[in-house]
Amino acid sequence: MLINPANSYSQTNDIANNQVNDQSAIESPKTAVNKTEKEAVAANNSGDVDLSSRSQKLAAITSEFFSGKDLTQLDINQLSQRLGEYGLISPEQHAKLNSNLKSNNENAHQPSQKLSSFLNNFSNSAQAKGLDDNLTASLDNAEHILKNVNKAKEDEGFSRILDQTISEFDKFLTSEEFKQLTPADQQSFKTVSSALDIVDQITPKNLNNKQLNSYLSIAKM
């Protein structure tokens, strides 16, 4: 369960869950993406959003990365690449993600390490003892989210807690405490921060009201 620094709450269904019941996407996410590629290009050229194509691509992303999967650093690198290929984030957002995800192999933890395991280990280390309570809660929230994104989205207030967690991580990455970490821990925290940003970027709340209504209509089909 996600932890609200101010209040605790119980789980319920979240309307912002990204699992889309588009039948073609469910049958074959990658095939569905290929079928709508021409439509996506046309939509991009017109400056509009092809929501049917978007929903199918999000379903493909969900199937590949978020279906009960405990995310690793390698997963986030591949996920960033896939988002760029599908056009689900802007070129500027993709460049920023790639910049944060560039890892020095000598300094980074093993790419196959689960991000939730890294966060759990860090939370129980001596380095975490003096951290701010809000950041400590955000470490727990990030661990819960990245352990199973789809399940985490079922928690009540998921979007609000995700925003709080991202905000705390953004502050931490510019803090003196962060500068005192080992290069490997710094890289892992940057990967965690990027992973949270990705989850935030591909949720329906980033669409305007008209697009969101159309998106939800597709999701209910």
Image (cartoon, helix red, strand yellow):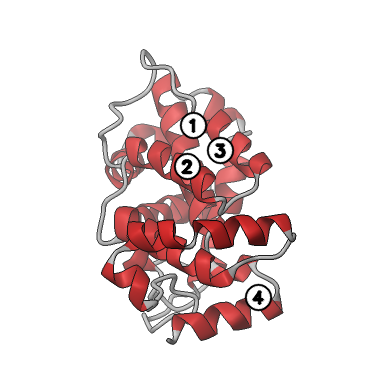
Q: Secondary structure at mark 3?
A: helix
Rendered image: mark on residue 19: none
- Report the Cα–Cα distance between label 4 and label 3: 25 Å
Q: Secondary structure at mark 1?
A: helix
Contact (CB < 8 A) between labels 3 and 2?
yes
Q: How many marks?
A: 4
Which residue is labeled 3 in the image?
97
Query: In this picture, is 195 found above or below 35?
Result: above
> What is the x, y in percent for residue 59?
39, 65
Contact (CB < 8 A) between labels 2 and 1?
yes
Q: Which residue: 28% across, 39% down?
A: 121
Q: Secondary structure at mark 4?
A: helix
Rendered image: mark on residue 101: 1
Q: Earlier in the sequence, mark 3 or mark 2?
A: 2
Which residue is labeled 2 in the image?
80
> What is the x, y in percent for residue 203?
53, 65
Amino acid, disc 3:
Leu
Occupied quadrant, residue 184: top left
